[in-house]
Image (tube, rainbow, N blue to C red):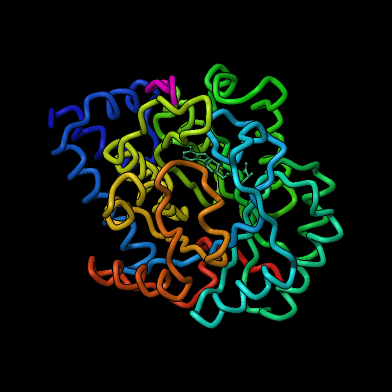
C-alpha cells in the first residue's frame, strides 16, 4: 500500500468524506494491503456502533412478474423464458409467520413491478402483517411508484423502503435501462420516500457493464447527499436470458472494498452483505461482514418458487428450506465471531413507526 492510500483511509476514517479525486485514488490504487487496512478500520467503526451483532431481515420474493425492462435483470419484462409466479396474501403471511418463529423481526417484501397487486391489496397485506406481528418492521421493495402510493403504504404501516438508485451517473443509467426508465424518476422516488418518513435503502451494483471509477465516485457523493439508512451494494452478475448475458460479473474484491469505504463514510448505516456477494464468492457474506457490513437477508420465500426469482445466474439459497437458511446464516455468522439477534434492527437513532 502506498503512503498516500493509507493517508486517504485515515482521512476517511476521521472525516467520513474525501474529495472526488481522493475517492478516485482510493479505488484505483487499491491493493491487498490497502483493503486489509480499510477493513480493519471499518470493523473498528462497525464494532463501536453495532458490537458483534448482525441484523437479520427475512426476504419474501412475492412476485416475479415485472413491467420494467432493466437490461441486467433476469425477471425483466422481455425475458419470455423467465418463470413467473405470484404469492397470495395468505402465502406471504405464512412466510412472515415462519420467519417470526425463527426470530426475524423485519420482513422485506420484494417483487418485480407487478401491477396485479393494487394499492388496496398492498395496504391490506401491510396491515395484516402489522396486526399479527406488531413487534416487526415491514420493508417494501416493489419499485417505482407515485408519491401518493408511497404515502398510502406508509399510512398502512410500512416502515422502510428499499430502492437501489442503481447508479448515480445519468449516462450509465441510460446504458443499463430502456429510455422510459429514468434516473430522474428513480431519484424522485427516493426523495419522496425520505420526505414521507420511511427509513430508506438505496445502493448500486458493482461493475455492471460500462461502470467506471468516476461512476462509483458519483454514487458515493449521491449517497452522501441522500443520507439513506441502508445501502445495499453487490456485484453485477450476468443472467443468461438478458442482453448482458456475455458480460463479465463484477468482482467480490471491489464489492468488499466498496463496503469498507461505505462503512467509514456512514458509520451508522445498515449495510447488507448481499446474496449477490454470496453468489460470486462462497464466503462472500462472511467477508462482507468482515469488511464492515452488518445485515444479512435470508430468503423466506416458499421453496416451490425460490428458483423462479432468478435475477442472475447461479443465485444461491434457491433450494433450501427457510429454516435451514436461517440456521445456516446464524452458523456462518458465529463462525466469524458475530451473533444474529432477534431485533427489528432499526438504524441507530431511528424511532420505530408503529
Ligand atoms: N423491482 C424492485 C426494484 O426495482 O427496486 C425490486 C426488485 S429488483 C429485482 C432488486 C435489485 O436486484 C435491483 O435493485 C438490482 O440492483 C438487483 N439486480 C437485478 N439484476 C441483477 C443482476 N443481474 N446482478 C446483480 N443484481 C441485480
Split into quadrants, the picture shows ligand 1 in the one at top right
Q: Examine the residues drawn in magenta and state their main secondary structure.
A: loop
**Front position in the image: 59 or 217:** 59
**Quadrant location of the N terminus in the rendered image:** top left
From the viewer's perspective, is residue 78 above or below residue 232? above
Across and down, in percent, residue 18 comes to 37, 31
Q: Is residue 236 above or below residue 129?
A: above
Q: Where residue 200 sits: x, y (%)?
A: 61, 50
Q: Position of residue 102 (x, y in %)?
A: 49, 80
Indicate the quadrant containing the C terminus: top left, top right, bottom left or bottom right.
bottom right
Total number of numbered discs in the rendering: 0
Residue at position x 57%, y 68% in the image = 106
* Magenta stretch, residue numbers: 209-214
The picture quadrant where one finds residue 133 is bottom right
Pick the front one: 352 or 279: 279
Q: Quadrant of residue 28?
A: top left
Q: Is residue 211 magenta?
A: yes
Name the residue at the top extreme.
171
In screen coordinates, is 95 left or right of 19? right
Q: Position of residue 233 (x, y in %)?
A: 44, 43
**Residue at the image point whose x is 71% and y is 34% from the top:** 188
State the image quarter where residue 80 is shown: top right
Q: Is residue 189 above or below residue 59?
A: above
Q: Residue at x 24, y 48 (%)?
A: 39
Residue in the image at 68% along x and 35% along y: 68
Amino acid at each position: 500500500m502506498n503512503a498516500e492510500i493509507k493517508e486517504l483511509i485515515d482521512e476517511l476514517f476521521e472525516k467520513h468524506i474525501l474529495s472526488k479525486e481522493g475517492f478516485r485514488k482510493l479505488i484505483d490504487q487499491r491493493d491487498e494491503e490497502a483493503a486489509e487496512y480499510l477493513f480493519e478500520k471499518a470493523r473498528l467503526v462497525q464494532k463501536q456502533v453495532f458490537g458483534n451483532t448482525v441484523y437479520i431481515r427475512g426476504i419474501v420474493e412475492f412476485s416475479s412478474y415485472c413491467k420494467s425492462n432493466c437490461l441486467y435483470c433476469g425477471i425483466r419484462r422481455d425475458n419470455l423464458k423467465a418463470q413467473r409466479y405470484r404469492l397470495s396474501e395468505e402465502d406471504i403471511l405464512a412466510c412472515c409467520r415462519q420467519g417470526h418463529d425463527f426470530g426475524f423481526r423485519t420482513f422485506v417484501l420484494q417483487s418485480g413491478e407487478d401491477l396485479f397487486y393494487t394499492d388496496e391489496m398492498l395496504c391490506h397485506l401491510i396491515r395484516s402483517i402489522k396486526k399479527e406481528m406488531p413487534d416487526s418492521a415491514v420493508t417494501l421493495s416493489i419499485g417505482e411508484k407515485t408519491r401518493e402510493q408511497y404515502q398510502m403504504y406508509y399510512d398502512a404501516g410500512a416502515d422502510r423502503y428499499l430502492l437501489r438508485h442503481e447508479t448515480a451517473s445519468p449516462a450509465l443509467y441510460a446504458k443499463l435501462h430502456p429510455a422510459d426508465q429514468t434516473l430522474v424518476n428513480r431519484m424522485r422516488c427516493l426523495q419522496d420516500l425520505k420526505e414521507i418518513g420511511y427509513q430508506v435503502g438505496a445502493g448500486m451494483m458493482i461493475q455492471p457493464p460500462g461502470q467506471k471509477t468516476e461512476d462509483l465516485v458519483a454514487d458515493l457523493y449521491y449517497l452522501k447527499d441522500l443520507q439513506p439508512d441502508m445501502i445495499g451494494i453487490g456485484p453485477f452478475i450476468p443472467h443468461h436470458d438478458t442482453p448482458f448475458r456475455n458480460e463479465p460479473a463484477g468482482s467480490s474484491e471491489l464489492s468488499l472494498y466498496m463496503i469498507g469505504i461505505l462503512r467509514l463514510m456512514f458509520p451508522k448505516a445498515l449495510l447488507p452483505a448481499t446474496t449477490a456477494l454470496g453468489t460470486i464468492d462462497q464466503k462472500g457474506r462472511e467477508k462482507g461482514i468482515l469488511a464492515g457490513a452488518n445485515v444479512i437477508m435470508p430468503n423466506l420465500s416458499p421453496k416451490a418458487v425460490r428458483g423462479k426469482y432468478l435475477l442472475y445466474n447461479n443465485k444461491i439459497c434457491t433450494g433450501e428450506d427457510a429454516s435451514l437458511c436461517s440456521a445456516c446464516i446464524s452458523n456462518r455468522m458465529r463462525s466469524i465471531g458475530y451473533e444474529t439477534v432477534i431485533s427489528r434492527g432499526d438504524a441507530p437513532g431511528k424511532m420505530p413507526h408503529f
